[in-house]
Image (tube, rainbow, N blue to C red):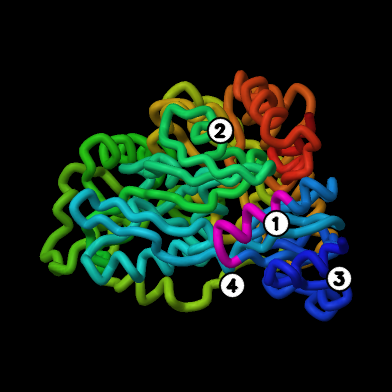
Amino acid sequence: MTPEDWARERKVQFIAQEALAGATDFPGSYGIDFGRLERRVPAFVLRPRSVDDLADCLCFLGAERLSYKLRGTAHTPGGEVLTESAVIDLTELTGIVADDPMTDEITVLGGTSWLAMWEHLQAQGRRPQTLTEHPRVTVAGSLTVGGIGDSSHLHGPQVAGVRRLLLVTPDGERHDVRPGHPLFDHALCGHGQLGALAEVTLASWRRPAILTGVILEWDTLEAFLRDALLIMAERLYDYLRPRLRWRVGNRVSAICGNLDETMWTTDPARHRLRPAAASHIEQVDILKAARQEVAGRFAAFGPCAEVVLPYPDGLETLRTLDRAVVTTGLWRRLPRGSALMLVGGTSGLPLSPFQAPRCLVLALRPEPTTLADAHACQALVRELAELALAGGGRLYLSSFPLRGDALERQLGDGARSLAALKTAVDPALLCNRGNLYGWEP
């Protein structure tokens, strides 16, 4: 039976390759992702709308020995969701499954966007514990890599708030798992190697959508890190988004504030900190801002290396990377600087790059305007990624695969435990082959 005939019989939406040729750019095309560095047109696309549909799709592709990629909003920088074989599009697998205001836990289908979940929660004065800069990505998509956001200095990555998973493995089996189960522990930050996150139960947080805060600036990297540690340890702000800069002005600036509808007369944490400058106090409805389309804010191409360093042991490596941004000339492609965050680590997740109790995350995302310049930037950020790995760091996101010694440093002991699970649930290696930084058993 052909894939199209099978889909018609099972009433699963099917998109043939010839119908995919019209769209040529992100996000409309299945042949490209957010990074726009590679192009691969799939043979066909399946779009399940229920967990049953999803399990049937995986069983069919497994029986036919057809490799496939799982795809949400394709917010990947280096072609992870691209293939010339099959694609399973999870963006129709959406909705709230359960919500318990007593425990502040919410269960959603994996293709639900963080924005849609936030809209639902905000009606009760709640929100996800932390939100990334782009809340239109799917819940499952960000949890397969980790998820760094506005309150990660308090709550850690988004994966730290996961309480339960319904994982559909490539053999079509459903696994209802919680922390401590090997499939739970390896599916989070596992880049889709073990199947699809069909349902996710997450902790939420009772906070309004109004941010009251200031922009603080520090004249040195060391001054910022001193205050960032204090902000984190004493929970001085709900919301923290810092950026390291290499052009004129102070070295670090950060939006700092509380999710609080009451307008401050003074910044309640200001007397504890020592910034070089502070703005006036402002209030912003960040949910209203999130509803606006953000695609135009991103660069035309997305080469990147987002490095994770243990804190404080990785400070010297951070200084090395800081100098290398200047000596390689990469700073010229970073007009807005780079996000620099101090975040809590994860516990019990072997594939998570956030292994230390506290981690520094430096997001090197240059903004080239041509494909040729993007590849030149790619070479520079890869050099810096290798410096980070050699200095005991790991990568959170990258636009290039890692192999050999670099991959071993990235995954550590998790490489062996993942390989055993992969062999058990996907012996033909059909699901997301090569996604985990180029890992191929």
The residue where tag 3 is placed is: 17
Three-letter amino acid code at disc 3? Gln
The image quadrant of residue 403 is: top right
- What residue lies at 62% left-to-right and 22% top-to-bottom? 417
Whole-angstrom CA distance, mark 1 to mark 3, is: 17 Å
Looking at the image, tell me whether mark 2 or mark 1 is earlier in sequence order: 1
Few, some or many C-alpha atoms within 10 Å of disc 3 (few <14, some 14-19, many ≥20)? some
Contact, CB < 8 Å: mark 4 with mark 1? no
The residue where tag 1 is placed is: 57
The image quadrant of residue 319 is: top right
Looking at the image, tell me whether mark 1 or mark 3 is earlier in sequence order: 3
- Say which element carries label 2: helix
Viewport quadrant of the N terminus: bottom right
Whole-angstrom CA distance, mark 2 to mark 1, is: 22 Å
Looking at the image, tell me whether mark 2 or mark 4 is earlier in sequence order: 2
Three-letter amino acid code at disc 2? His
- The range drawn in magenta is 49-59
Looking at the image, tell me whether mark 3 or mark 2 is earlier in sequence order: 3
